[in-house]
């Protein structure tokens, strides 16, 4: 089973709008890919002016990355967050 991790940085002032956008795209993923569970987490580092967010998609079916890219392009996330980094991990 693969798990997809997506992480990026954003300003705390943009958190509410970003959270709404992520929740919307995650609901689309759950509708379009049966059985996928999603999570949204953040790492607050008081030494930094922005925060790191992490989206988790488990299991991560083939085609999920392309589907996410299409969904993200239709949200305001590109304007709110830094570059999204995607990493797929498999259990060993």
Image (tube, rainbow, N blue to C red):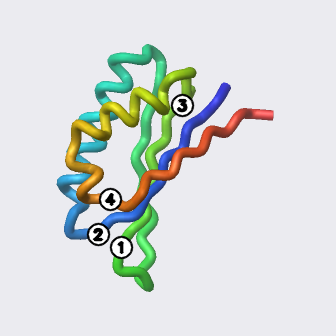
Secondary structure beneath label 1: loop
The image quadrant of residue 20 is top left
The x, y position of residue 41, in whole percent, is 42, 53
Q: Residue furthest bottom?
A: 47
Is residue 9 rendered to the left or right of residue 61?
Answer: left
Q: Residue at x 54, y 31 (%)?
A: 58
The x, y position of residue 52, in whole percent, is 43, 63
The residue that label 1 is drawn on is: 50
Earlier along the polypeptide chain: callout 1 or callout 2? 2
Q: Residue furthest right?
A: 92
The x, y position of residue 43, in whole percent, is 45, 65
Mark 1 is surrounded, within 10 Å at the Cα level, by few (under 14), some (14 to 19) or many (20 or more) other residues, namely some
The x, y position of residue 46, in whole percent, is 41, 81
Is residue 90 rendered to the left or right of residue 39?
Answer: right
Give the label on residue 11, or none. 2
CA distance separating discs 3 and 4: 22 Å
Asked whether the residues under the numbered discs 2 and 4 touch, taking CB atoms below 8 Å apart as contact, a structural biologist would say: no
């Amino acid at each position: 089973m693969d798990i997809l991790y997506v992480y990026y940085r954003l300003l705390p002032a943009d958190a509410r709008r970003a959270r709404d956008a992520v929740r919307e795209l995650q609901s689309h993923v759950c509708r379009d890919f049966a059985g996928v569970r999603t999570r949204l987490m953040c790492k607050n580092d008081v030494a930094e002016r922005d925060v790191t967010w992490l989206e988790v998609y488990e299991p991560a079916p083939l085609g999920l990355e392309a589907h996410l890219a299409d969904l993200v392009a239709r949200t305001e996330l590109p304007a709110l967050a830094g570059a999204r980094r995607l990493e797929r991990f498999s259990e060993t």
